[in-house]
Amino acid sequence: MKSRSIRIALVKQDVYQDLYVSGSGERDPASMLFSSTNRVGPIGLFTLLGADFYIVREEQTPECQVYRRVIPHLADQLQLLKTRRLDQIPGHEFFRPGSQQTHADFSVNCYDVAWGAYDVVISVNVSLPKRLVRKFPRTLFCYMIGEANLFTKRVRFGYDVCLNQEARGRIATKPGVVDFPYTFVGARCLELLLLRHLKRTSEQSGIYAEINSCPERPVTSVPPAFRSLEPLGHPVRLHRQRISENLAEIYDAKYFLKLGGRKIRGNSVIEAISLGTLALIDPDSVTHRELLPRETWVRSVAEARQRIQYLDEYPPRYQALLAQQRQRLDQYVAACPIVSMRNCLEYKRRKLSRPIHPTFHPATAVAESTSKTCADC
């Protein structure tokens, strides 16, 4: 994509229970990724766009307290994350955070950061107060609620953009609700990070059992449905609690498979594809179904067995399907959101420079379309 670079900052509060435990001086995306408390998140902001990262101390304004409405049953416990790791919080002992440090080692006062030096600031939940956002009119301020489907119908809290965790290939032309997945990565971002971290190529062996196919937490045993696939010659790889270990399991697997369990958004599917592992899944059980060519759909153990046998016998077809999934990931997960972000920024800055016409009346304005397809990105 040929376009000028934009300077981006990602920011979270010191009461957020996920993502990186790292400071603004960290420049190694792998170190940042492996410091995560739980999920991969938008690590592509750093691998693809060279973003900066901040942890800010909790502010008491109503908008910065929105996390209490997102997960009210944990809100008081999350206060402990200011000085403790997630596995030190009662009821969360089974987690294995990637970093032994805490938010207190890196958190800063949000008023001490020069947000105006950035073109785009992306806040997980609402980390920056409305009054602070208003001080930087040339910066595009976006928020993404950590739990999907909440506060996504319209833009709130004085921000410009709401990132809705979708990846449908829609390109925004102006600020508003914008498609942008929680796991924002390129087609090979995670594979390259693991290659460098492990200093070896993938073993390309085994079937990784998607965590929602497993009834227990943490996962310690192979689910019965997956046991029946072991005679195919692939060991079943299970979810690991520490992010670096879990990503290594997916990286070394040949197949990523979900059988049963609740419907998922598909962040783990994005991870698998970016790690170079073919995802096999029922399209009705995942929100990000756009990433799945029909030949990678499986709805039962029998279909999974048949598909794996076929792809093991015909390696070129396996490579072709993986290439299709990577291409779709690049389009829907990476390229379209980046174009949307640039469009929103340019629209905001153009609007700032427009003179106000005294005879203008809203009733005479022509409504502008907020999105188009991703055919050109």
Image (cartoon, grey):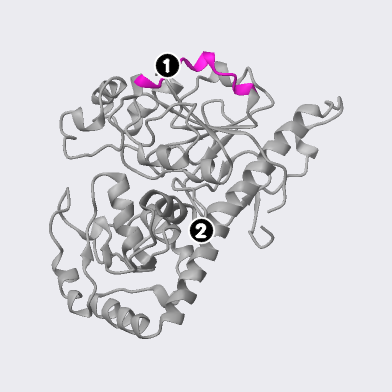
**337 lies above or below 226:** above
Q: In the image shown, does 170 or 306 lie closer to the viewer?
A: 306
Q: Is residue 345 left or right of residue 77?
A: right
**155 lies above or below 127:** below
Q: Residue at x 33, y 26 (%)?
A: 68
Q: Is residue 377 left or right of residue 363?
A: left
- Residue 350 — which label? none
Q: Residue furthest front?
A: 199
Label 1 SS: loop
Query: Callout 2: few (<14), some (14-19), or many (20+) C-alpha neighbours within 10 Å?
Result: many
Residue 361 percent coordinates (x, y): 80, 32
Residue 105 percent coordinates (x, y): 36, 20
Q: Residue at x 76, y 27 (%)?
A: 352
> Which residue matches tag 1?
59
Label 2 SS: loop
> Which residue matches tag 2?
187
Q: Magenta residues, as a range?
A: 105-116
The amino acid type of the residue labelled 2 equals Ala
The amino acid type of the residue labelled 1 equals Glu
Q: Residue at x 44, y 45 (%)?
A: 182
Instruction: Say if the magenta span includes residue 352.
Output: no
Question: Could you tell me which quadrant the C terminus lies in?
Answer: bottom right
Q: In the image shown, does 282 or 4 lie closer to the viewer?
A: 4
Q: In the image shown, does 144 or 377 lie closer to the viewer?
A: 377
Q: State the image quarter where residue 230 is shown.
A: bottom left
Query: Callout 1: few (<14), some (14-19), or many (20+) C-alpha neighbours within 10 Å?
Result: some
Q: Is residue 320 left or right of residue 136?
A: left
